[in-house]
Image (cartoon, helix red, strand yellow):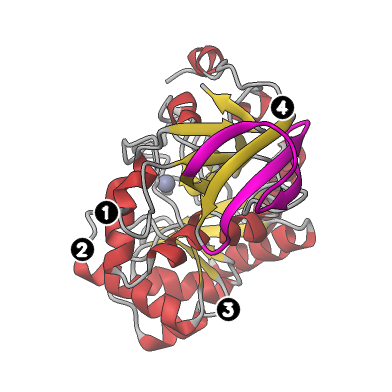
Amino acid sequence: MGLLMLACAVEAVVPEPASGLVQGLQIVGVGRVDLRIEQGQIVEVGPALEGDGEDLGGAWVVPGWIDSHVHLAYLDAAPELAEAGVVAAVDLAAPVDVFEVEGWPLEVLWAGPMITAPGGYPTQGWGSNGYGWQVSGVDEARAAVRALHEAGASLIKVPLTGSDELSDEELSAIAEEAHALGLRVAVHALSEEAAARGARAGFDVLAHTPTESLSEHTVQAWSDKAVVTTLGAFGGAASTVDNLRRLRAAGTTVLYGTDLGNTRTPAIDPREVELLLLAGLSVEDLLVAGTSAPASYWGLDRYGDLSVGKEASFLVLSGDPRQDSAALSAPSAVYRGGARWP
Ligand SMILES: [Zn+2]
């Protein structure tokens, strides 16, 4: 898909930040509250705030959602994603000219092109059109990190697929250069060998839950790092689900992500939700993985919960998500910055 088309597609109309009172919201772990909102931001939270506002009558709400693995240049679905209540996303591979596109209806952290070896993933397949930045040698690897940072990248992505890979020296140089610039490195690593190699290189976050069963040593190597779930993207096999269960038990930070673009549901994906519950997350854990954990991990400080100082963006659900997790994927309304939308 050309970026010209993309530039047109992202002109979705997001409401202006609103002010006022929204009453009668039920929040999991918080209870029934009212929110006072000024210019899109929550300024007061309490069980019975003074004044007249819009009354949601005790409807269940969850904070604006964050998807930590999407491809919005690859699949033209940003407006639908935003309208389904996703307020921010981490895009883990796009051509470099995507940094020039403005007007996205949700906040996007871009990795830009993956840094890869000559002929490496994804340059010979789906990503042949600018989704990989081919480097050779430590100096070129470092220069690519710096150039992406300058262009506007918020993180770096590196693929390890078992063929045409960067050397250990190049991988370590990328990690070092990225960390010096305050950027994290996400690694595409589906096998035991790739996940082990990514940890040794000093990378920070698994772009996917690996699909091949991980050794205990590799699970431990990732225990103080993070993993983006994407259980549905590769079919939700038992080995993948089990890897996530073990990474989580070891202490790895779990970030909800779908790989939208390779998957095709621009919403809180019901298939991903189902697989996360199968991996042993409770609905409360799932809410953390889709709201407060990624907000804190990625520095998306306006989001994550509905407390004073945060943006008044949330999904209104048809019921308690702990009783009916499918409600997350079909909100009856979405609020952005205090305004009902669309
Ligand atoms: Zn992806």
User: Is there CB contact under 8 Å for labels 1 and 2?
Assistant: yes
Q: Which residue is mark 3?
A: 224
Q: Residues within 10 Å of mark 2 (few under 14, many from 20)?
A: few
Q: Nearer the viewer, residue 156 or 273?
A: 273
The residue to which callout 4 is attached is 17
Residue 234 numbered mark, or none: 1
Between marks 4 and 2, how big is the CA–CA gap? Answer: 42 Å
Q: Nearer the viewer, residue 245 or 337?
A: 337
Question: In the image, which residues are magenta?
Answer: 29-58
Task: Calculate the distance from the C-alpha at mark 1 to the C-alpha at mark 2.
Answer: 7 Å
Residues at discs 4 and 2 in contact (Cβ within 8 Å): no
CA gap between label 3 and label 2 equals 25 Å
**Upstream in sequence: badge 4 or badge 2:** 4
**Amino acid under disc 3:** Asp
- Callouts 3 and 2 close, C-beta under 8 Å: no
The label shown at residue 237 is: 2
Q: Is residue 212 visible?
A: no
Marked residue nearer the N-terminal end (3 or 2): 3
In this rendering, the label closer to the viewer, 3 or 4: 4
For the point 61% across and 51% down, the residue is: 33
Distance of mark 3 from mark 4, alpha carbons? 37 Å
Could you say whether the residue bearing mark 2 is in a helix, strand or loop? loop
